[in-house]
Amino acid sequence: MVSMPHPLDSTLGPMAPFVSQLLAKLAATGITISQPTVDHLCYRAATLPEYRALCAVLAEAGTLLVEGMIGGRPIATYQLHQPVEAGAVRVPCIELAAPKPGRVHQAGLEHIELVVSSLADLVACHPELPFKTGNMRDSRNPDVALMLPSGQIKFHLRPLADVIAEEVATGAVVAVPADYFEQD
């Protein structure tokens, strides 16, 4: 799979090789997805100042779909003006996660998410794999995750941009508190 350089690679690291490597490792597990739909990749910031600086960079490279509180910290998702291209796979969005309060995080590319038709079938067909299935019952955006040596792959049923549009339309987004960034 040929990876195309992306303008954000100098800031976030080589994104297409990250996607390609995870898809290759996934194939090595025995999971074959003939035309994978990778709807986004995630970069985790190590500090709140880094998160804020990267939000500014990503705002130039894409359109902010949403920023909200998820798991006790802000996460922003951007629709990229230029998708990440890893061979035939095009990744249209990037998720930027702030660090969780009280935890130390290493900055870097963290995971990709793929859209699949059935989470239950995926898990049932590969009982030998250590899927994390805790979010399978999430009513809005269920997922399962698989940790690989080079990063994590999450699987869900709908593209993140569709889930975000629904959350925005229904008022389900939890706003980042006005004073949240005063702690940095």
Image (cartoon, rainbow, N blue to C red):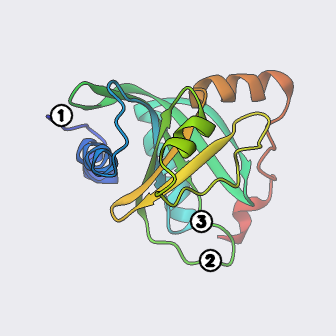
Percent across and percent down for residue 183 are: 71, 70
Which comes before the other along the chain, label 1 or label 3? 1
Looking at the image, which residue is at 40% across and 33% down? Answer: 61
Q: CA distance from mark 3 to mark 2?
A: 7 Å
Q: Around disc 1, counting alpha carbons within 10 Å, would you say few (fewer than 14), some (14 to 19), or many (20 or more)?
A: some
Residue at screen point 80% across, 36% down: 139
Q: CA distance from mark 1 to mark 3?
A: 29 Å
**Looking at the image, how many numbered discs can be counted on the residues?**
3
The amino acid beneath tag 2 is Arg
Q: Residue furthest left?
A: 2
Q: Earlier in the sequence, mark 2 or mark 1?
A: 1
Residue beneath disc 3: 99
In the rendered image, the quadrant that contains the N terminus is top left
Residue at mark 1: 4
On the image, numbered disc 2 is attached to which residue?
103
Compared with residue 117, is residue 128 higher up or lower down, i.e. above or below? below
Q: Position of residue 165 (x, y in %)?
A: 69, 23
Q: Nearer the viewer, residue 64 or 121?
A: 121
> Which amino acid does the dot numbered 1 rest on?
Met
Q: Are marks 3 and 2 in contact (CB under 8 Å)?
A: yes
Q: Is residue 78 left or right of residue 112?
A: right
- Report whether 89 appears left or right of 98: left
Dot 2: few (<14), some (14–19), or many (≥20) neighbours within 10 Å?
Answer: few
Picture coordinates of residue 74, whole percent (x, y): 67, 53
In this image, 150 relative to 144: left or right?
left
Circles 2 and 1: CB atoms closer than 8 Å: no
Nearer the observer, 69 or 58: 69
Query: How far apart are labels 2 and 1 at the CA level?
Result: 34 Å
Provide the secondary structure element on which disc 2 rests.
Answer: loop
User: Which residue is rendered at x = 70% and y = 55% of the image?
Assistant: 134
